[in-house]
Image (cartoon, rainbow, N blue to C red):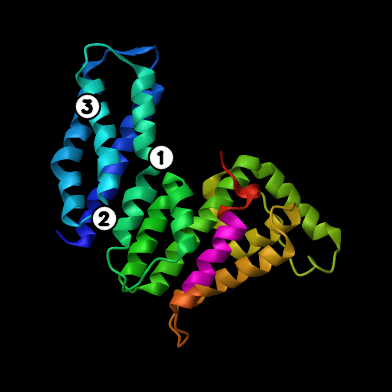
């Protein structure tokens, strides 16, 4: 098994465990009686013991980390084989497994080679990202490890813009439309270059008709970012664009570190963009 295969296995295993966790969270009652649910928990536990744990041992993961997760899956297996088990017990164990999975297992797996280390800020973003953002960020991390830095920038920006767009949806698309109208009519020297008024009614429409650069202007006027944050995100957007088109400007590891540091500070760690 190589590192990429391990990364794939960990990602698929985490997705399967998170799916089971969501099912248990959605069932009513105090006790779990459905055998199919217990079987799903037993199945993922068996996969830990038969597939994931041996793979981690092969790559010489820290013994203490393996022991912690083995105890958790041992508990999950015991609950799934018991005649009567409380729903809260399943939720607790699954929560313990899922909450630290990225930081404890996936990020260290990315570090198995030091040829192209991940920026620390990307590690932080990965550990707190939503499932939707994680799809982009995990691919971005894989690109960095493979030395494909321009592709990593494009995927990293996708995750950031997804967070910004979903925040707009959460705060209200009608309010976004009003802010764009106010910004145009305000007459401020800062916003006079912006002349677009939007009438967006769905997230899909926001994604398809509002350019990222225009979105940043509305976010600043709205007060979700300040002028300095806007300038930094604009620089990130320029890097994204230069990465997506032919040119002589190379993307270095220092560029990557700055790029993800700004995304972390201005978007992912910004209270304005907190989704939950």
Measure how far apart labels 3 and 1 are at the Cα level.
Answer: 18 Å
Q: Position of residue 41 (x, y in %)?
A: 24, 28
Q: Is residue 210 visible?
A: no
Quadrant containing the C terminus is top right
Viewed as shown, does residue 163 lie left or right of 23? right
Question: Which residue sits at x=33%, y=74%?
Answer: 147
Q: Earlier in the sequence, mark 3 or mark 1?
A: 3
Q: Which residue is mark 3?
A: 77
Q: Which residue is mark 2?
A: 7
Q: Which residue is mark 1?
A: 99
Question: Which residue sits at x=51%, y=48%?
Answer: 204
Q: Callout 3 environment at 10 Å: few (<14), some (14 to 19), or many (20+)?
A: many
SS at mark 2 in the image: helix
Q: Earlier in the sequence, mark 2 or mark 3?
A: 2
Q: Residue furthest right?
A: 187
Closer to us: mark 1 or mark 2?
1
Task: Specify the segment rendered in magenta.
Answer: 256-267
Viewed as shown, does residue 165 lie left or right of 151? right
Our reading of the magenta stretch's main secondary structure is helix
SS at mark 1 in the image: helix
Q: Earlier in the sequence, mark 1 or mark 2?
A: 2
Question: Which residue sits at x=34%, y=37%?
Answer: 97
Viewed as shown, does residue 116 lie left or right of 167? left
């Amino acid at each position: 098994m190589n590192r990429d295969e391990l990364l794939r296995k960990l990602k698929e295993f985490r997705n399967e465990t998170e799916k089971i966790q969501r099912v248990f969270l959605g069932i009513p009652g105090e006790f779990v009686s459905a055998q199919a649910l217990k079987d799903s928990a037993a199945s993922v536990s068996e996969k830990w013991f038969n597939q994931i744990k041996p793979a981690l041992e092969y790559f010489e993961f820290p013994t203490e980390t393996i022991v912690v997760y083995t105890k958790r899956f041992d508990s999950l297996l015991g609950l799934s084989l018991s005649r009567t088990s409380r729903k809260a017990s399943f939720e607790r164990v699954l929560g313990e497994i899922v909450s630290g999975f990225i930081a404890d297992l996936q990020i260290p797996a990315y570090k198995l080679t030091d040829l192209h280390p991940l920026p620390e800020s990307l590690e932080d973003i990965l550990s707190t990202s939503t499932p939707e953002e994680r799809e982009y960020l995990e691919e971005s991390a894989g690109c960095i490890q493979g030395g494909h830095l321009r592709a990593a920038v494009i995927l990293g920006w996708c995750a950031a813009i997804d967070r910004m767009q979903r925040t707009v949806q959460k705060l209200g698309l009608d309010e976004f439309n009003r802010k764009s109208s106010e910004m145009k009519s305000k007459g401020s020297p800062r916003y006079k270059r912006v002349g677009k008024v939007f009438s967006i009614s769905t997230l899909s429409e926001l994604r398809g008709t509002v350019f990222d650069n225009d979105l940043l202007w509305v976010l600043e006027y709205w007060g979700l970012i300040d002028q300095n944050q806007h300038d930094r995100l604009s620089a990130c957007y320029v890097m994204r664009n230069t990465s997506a088109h032919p040119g002589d400007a190379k993307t270095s590891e220092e560029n990557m570190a700055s790029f993800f540091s700004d995304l972390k500070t201005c978007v992912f760690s910004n209270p304005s963009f907190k989704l939950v």
